[in-house]
Image (cartoon, rainbow, N blue to C red):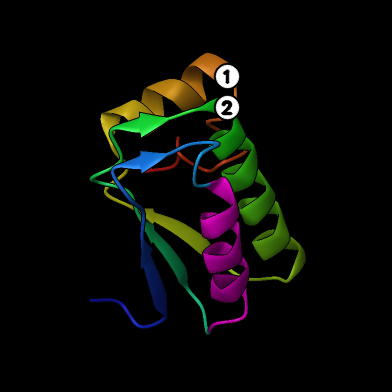
Amino acid sequence: MATGSTLKLPEELSIANVTEWKNKLIDLVNEPEPLLLEADQLARVDTAAMQLLLAFVRKASAANKSCQWQNPSTVLIETAEQLGLSQSLSLNAD
């Protein structure tokens, strides 16, 4: 495993649990880099969750921290593509 901090995302990230995950993501930004988001189990993600993830990536960038995706799920990739967020979330960089 890479050094840094990893946060495993749940199977569902939606408006129903976005506040809980906001707090976890805020805590992650304060951890040593690289910041890793493990997203292989993410099977459902809505637009509120995508806004949260985008805010997290931007906050990490503003703090000059590297944020990386570890095994992003197909659902996450497809949702980001549909919303035009792939580049902003750095999901298109392999």
CB atoms of marks 1 and 2 within 8 Å: yes
Instruction: From the top left corner, tell me how far across and down residue 38 is, in percent.
Output: 32, 56
Callout 2: SS: helix
Judged by its main secondary structure, the magenta piece is helix
Q: Which residue is mark 1?
A: 83
Residue 42 placement: quadrant:
top left
Quadrant location, the N terminus: bottom left
Residue 8 placement: quadrant:
bottom left
For this rendering, which residue is in front, 41 or 85?
41
Q: Which residue is mark 2?
A: 47
Callout 1: SS: helix
Going from N to C along the chain, the mark reached first, 1 or 2, is 2
The three-letter code of the residue at mark 2 reads Thr
Vertical comparison of 19 with 35: above or below = above
Residue in the image at 45% along x and 35% along y = 92
The reply, left or right, for residue 28 in relation to residue 57 is left
**Magenta segment, which residues?**
18-31
Residue in the image at 70% along x and 70% along y = 64
Quadrant location, the C terminus: top left
Residue 91 placement: quadrant:
top left
For this rendering, which residue is in front, 71 or 27?
27
**What crowding class fits label 2: few (fewer than 14 Cα within 10 Å), some (14-19), or many (20 or more)?**
some
For this rendering, which residue is in front, 16 or 51?
16
